[in-house]
Image (cartoon, rainbow, N blue to C red):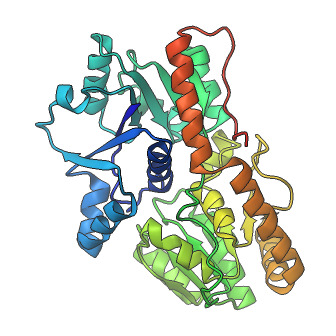
Amino acid sequence: MKCVLFYHAFTSCWNNGNAHFLRGYARELRALGHEVVVFEPIDGWSRLNAIREAGSQALQDVGQLFPGISIRRYDASLDFDEALDGADLVVVHEWNSPDVIEKIGHKRAHGAPFTLLFHDTHHRAVTAPDELAQFDLDAFDGVLAFGEVLRQIYAKLGWGDRAYTWHEGADVAMYRPLPNVEHTDDLVWIGNWGDGERSAELGEFLVDPVAELKLCASVYGVRYSGTALQTIRAAGIRHGGWLPAHWAPVAFAGARATIHVPRGPYVRSLPGIPTIRVFEALACGVPLVSAPWSDAEGLFPGGAYLKAANGTEMKRALRTVLDDQALSSAMIETGLRAIRERHTCRHRAQQLVDIAADIRTSASSSRPLRYIGASA
């Protein structure tokens, strides 16, 4: 099967948390024997910011990490007939421009034989429906929603059984334990400070616990304002700047623990959807403590990570993880098993192949198909 994937960015992960999974399932489609072609705009904001911050070499490294995948950059002159020629499956990620989405949909509406899927990994369906309304999805065969609650929203919008729950997963070819890396931090957190969606939460669950417990901690990410940098440095936290996704396993391996601080819109409006950092941390074998988040779909078993309802509980949980080696080891084992048995990019790639086959063989199924998590 020829799979053509349209991403906002493949070679860049700058402010692009989706990069890990988008790259990972492309890798696994290739490993399953499919031809994989990825298109990314040459002037995408993630790519341009990465080049501005770290130079083009950081992006060149990515292509070498994913052999066999054809990466094609395009501009406004892209010939969509040529780009989609021979495609059996086309997946369009939601960070593409409305214009690109419309043009690909136009090809499908006028007889192109490929199966066309829209991949939604954002909260805008709830928080900014007007933005979603800019996308012309009439010709799409289905929607891949990265959580059941989002699938239900699409179902209510008329997609019915053409909306599929397709969670993210871990690229275990890259995200794995690195036992030979020396622990240099008590705590590491990887994430972008962003536009204020979780500033209060980061103060409560990251900055204050580190300061009060006097932990050696590092954070990595972009979009840290001057005020944010001042806040974390006052707590004794080192800011390492942008960390390319393929370097994250080393950062995790160098820490004794990490935390999960989800953004407010996901907690309030899309319960049951973890950030990619949960998959990454568990796959890398680092003990995880999470700020409030509801695993409404039962993706992870008890014991895979600890929960903290507030800053006081976060401090207590971090102290316990750092002091109790037996507990820490058990958490690592449980988390690794959960990822390897249910939540790898290979699982998701196979799900995607199955979804495409289902659409081709049954244009109107009478039952909703829910791909929640993954079967072994």
Q: Position of residue 3 (x, y in %)?
A: 38, 34
Quarter containing the N terminus: top left
Is residue 107 shown above or below 120?
A: above
Q: Nearer the viewer, residue 132 or 139?
A: 139
Quarter containing the C terminus: top right
Is residue 173 shown above or below 371?
A: below
Give the left or right position of residue 86, taking residue 276 as reference: left
Give the left or right position of residue 364, taking residue 131 as reference: right
Give the left or right position of residue 112, taking residue 223 as reference: left
Give the left or right position of residue 346, taking residue 337 as reference: left
Q: Position of residue 265 (x, y in %)?
A: 59, 46
Q: Position of residue 355 (x, y in %)?
A: 56, 26
Q: Position of residue 174 (x, y in %)?
A: 52, 65
Q: Specify the quadrant of the image occupied by residue 290.
A: bottom right
Is residue 66 shown above or below 157?
A: below
Q: Residue at x 60, y 86 (%)?
A: 181
Q: Nearer the viewer, residue 297 or 125?
A: 297
Q: Specify the quadrant of the image occupied by residue 205.
A: bottom right
Q: Nearer the viewer, residue 39 or 159?
A: 39
Q: Residue at x 15, y 43 (%)?
A: 75
Does residue 128 appear in the picture of this structure?
Answer: no
Does residue 339 appear in the picture of this structure?
Answer: yes
Q: Specify the quadrant of the image occupied by residue 303.
A: bottom right
Q: How many marks?
A: 0
Is residue 304 shown above or below 181?
A: above
Q: Residue at x 76, y 48 (%)?
A: 294
In the rendered image, the residue lying farthest to the left is: 77
